[in-house]
Image (cartoon, coloured by chain):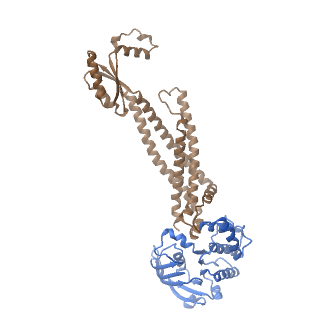
Chain colours: A brown, B blue
Amino acid sequence: MKNRFNLGYFLREGFGSIFTHGLMSFAAVCMIVACLLIMGSFALLAINAERMLSQAEDDNEFLAIIEETYTDQQIAQLQAQVSQVDNVLSVTFITREQAKEDYLGEHADEGLYAEISDEVFRDRLSIHVEDLEQFDQTVAAVEALPGVVNIRAMGELARGFVTVRNVAAALATALVVILAAVSLFIISNTIRLATFTRREEIAIMKMCGATDGFVRWPFVFEGLMLGLAGALVAFLAQWGIYTAVYRMVEVNGAMGMFPLMRFGAIGWPVLGIFLLSGALIGACGSGLAIRRFLQV
Amino acid sequence: MIRLMDVCKEYDNGTKALNGVNLRIDDGEFVFLVGPSGSGKSTIIKLLTAEVASTSGRVMVNGYNLNNIRRWQVPYMRRTLGVIFQDFRLIEKKTVRGNLEFVMRIIGATPREMRRRIPYVLDLVGLGDKAEVYPNQMSGGEQQRVAIARALINNPEMIIADEPTGNLDPQRSLEIMTLLERINSMGTTMLVVTHEKELVNRFSKRVVAIQDGTLISDERGGYYQYEKSV
């Protein structure tokens, strides 16, 4: 008789074992849920920070105020010089009249500025940068050019986004590794306890000529099912938590500053990653747990 | 067929369990392996089932050389053996049929093969009407018959019985030994480890006696040679 991969049998055995060791199974699912939830939350934070950073980069600019005595020709030369600076995406010349109009447009309700003179404003270059991480270096390079008397930049905001993104990404990566290891350890121990109660059965199987694979598969499927169940619960919880945060930001009118992504836009990838992670953690944890009991 | 050639076994803790054992059991033989506790009987069984490896010497079981057997080959070697334990080692949560199906499934038997083979083997051990009964609803003798049925179910070349009557009263012991003799008469090689002097004498088979890791006698058609030797 040849070895057959009896999927139905392995699934039945694995499924049955989940309920035979109900409490252990519950503990394993809870651990997977907790780990995936923490991992997922940080990953979503990193994704949103990255998105905000991209948006900030899209309209990120600083102003270079031009020496008052500069002629149109000198300004054109300066504009050309600025556009040669590394990380500069585009340079736009803004006359003092346009600057005044823009200013008044931004402060339309404040009648105090209605009579303000053009002379208060200066000609300027509006400079868009490509990479926010090099924002400070770009500002310094432009500031060093002759003809630039002052710089107006929102560097703090840019640096803030970069910091949030980098910290969230680093945390998410570290947590993925740490929590995956913790989950693996816990599910491995959970299944090991379940396996311990069945060691006699395993010993009989081995003595009757069962291959390692035949003994291992039901446990692997058990872990797999626990992992998938945990992933599904974690996904639903993540959905709920994210939606609540999204609504809170929306209600507080902070969406302009923190434009969060809708969960619908990232739901499927999150579900896929959760299921894959849960399945891997469950199956690998079980595979590791059973190893010791196969040495018969 | 079994061949042990100058086999020594020393465990990691320094215990010398076997000391140059030579033994040959041909196909179809019925052999009693006797000896006091700690004499090395269990070590011989563990060597034959590849639970442990010999320190030196050669071990051959049903065509497998256990000295250089690969890990993946061990299950296939074990399928040529049926093992019976003193404490039966049945799975309590499975019925008699479940216990036998469980073992047949290991070798990839189809449901049809199971339906055909299980009633035959249960009839052979006298439990034709107990297929749906759980082990804890049976007597010790019946449980040992289930264990024999399990050892037989995959049609092994050889059965190794480790104290099969150790937990049974004399009458049940006699029944079990008679059953093993009957199975042997159908062509299955039988190696029975036992302390039961009366049974050994009664069945008058080949008796191999071991003491302190050394074979001290090997008599065909003999009685409990161990006692005679010491």
x and y, in percent, of residue A290 in the image: 53, 61
Q: Is residue B1 left or right of residue B88?
A: left
Outermost residue toward the left in this view: A146
Q: Where is residue B163 drawn, in percent x and y? A: 61, 78
Could one spot residue B193 in this view of the protein? Answer: no
Q: Residue at x 45, y 13 (%)?
A: A110
* Residue B197 rendering spot, x and y as whole percentages: 62, 86
Q: Residue furthest right?
A: B129
Label total for image: 0
Q: Can you give x and y, in whole percent of width and height, for residue A149 in the image?
A: 28, 21
Residue that extends furthest to the top in the rendered view of this protein: A115
Position of the N terminus of chain A, as image quadrant, is: bottom right
Which residue is more in the foreground, A274 or A19?
A: A274
Q: Quadrant of residue B33?
A: bottom right
Residue at 56 percent across and 42 percent down: it is A235
Residue B21 visible, this angle: yes
Quarter location, residue B228: bottom right
Q: Is A109 in front, or is B106? A: B106
Q: Is residue A283 above or below residue A100?
A: below
